[in-house]
């Protein structure tokens, strides 16, 4: 099995590489740290508590609408099934 031998060689090479890196002393690279001034956010962009209430109500309404649609589709599927099965039973009589 060639792939197993290749895998084992790759693992050995990787382990040797990691051990060589660990044996070397770490090198610290000094980078100047510069702190940027925070960007001012306009008060219009932040959501107000009242806006959050409206968003929550909108989400709840959308969920209720989705559930109503799902129930409607389920009823339509059941009606279609019943009518199809009635036709099948009439055809076999």
Image (spheres, grey):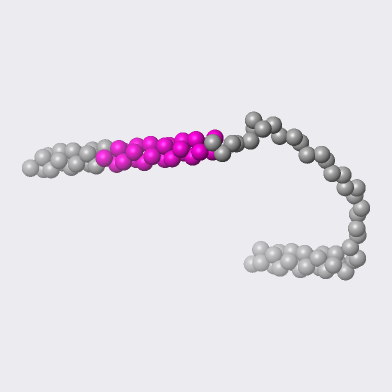
Along the horizontal axis of the image, is 68 left or right of 21? left
Q: Which residue is drawn at 35% across and 37% down?
A: 69
Quarter of the image with the N terminus is bottom right
Q: Residue at x 84, y 44 (%)?
A: 35
Identity of the residue furthest to the front in this view? 50
Residue 66 seen in the figure: no
Residue 36: percent from left, percent from top: 83, 40
Decide whether residue 53 is among the magenta residues: yes
Q: Nearer the viewer, residue 44 or 74?
A: 44
Q: Residue at x 18, y 38 (%)?
A: 83
Quarter of the image with the C terminus is top left
* Up-down relation of residue 51 to residue 18 (above or below): above
Decide whether residue 1 is among the magenta residues: no
Give, as a single range, the part of the protein colored magenta: 51-75
Along the horizontal axis of the image, is 71 left or right of 50? left
Residue 86: percent from left, percent from top: 15, 40
Residue 43: percent from left, percent from top: 67, 32
Identity of the residue furthest to the left in this view? 93
* Up-down relation of residue 48 to residue 2 (above or below): above
Q: Which of 49 and 45 is in front in this view?
A: 49
Residue 66 figure quarter? top left
Residue 47 seen in the figure: yes
Q: Which residue is drawn at 10% across and 40% down?
A: 90
Give the dominant element type of the magenta stretch: helix, strand or loop: helix
* Up-down relation of residue 46 to residue 21 (above or below): above
* Up-down relation of residue 13 to residue 90 (above or below): below
């Amino acid at each position: 099995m060639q792939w197993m031998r290749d895998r084992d060689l790759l693992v050995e090479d990787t382990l040797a590489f990691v051990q060589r890196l660990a044996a070397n002393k770490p090198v610290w690279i000094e980078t100047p740290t510069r702190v940027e001034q925070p960007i001012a956010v306009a008060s219009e962009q932040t959501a107000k508590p009242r806006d959050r209430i409206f968003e929550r109500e909108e989400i709840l309404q959308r969920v209720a609408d989705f559930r109503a649609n799902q129930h409607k589709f389920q009823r339509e599927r059941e009606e279609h099934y019943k009518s199809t099965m009635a036709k099948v039973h009439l055809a076999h009589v």
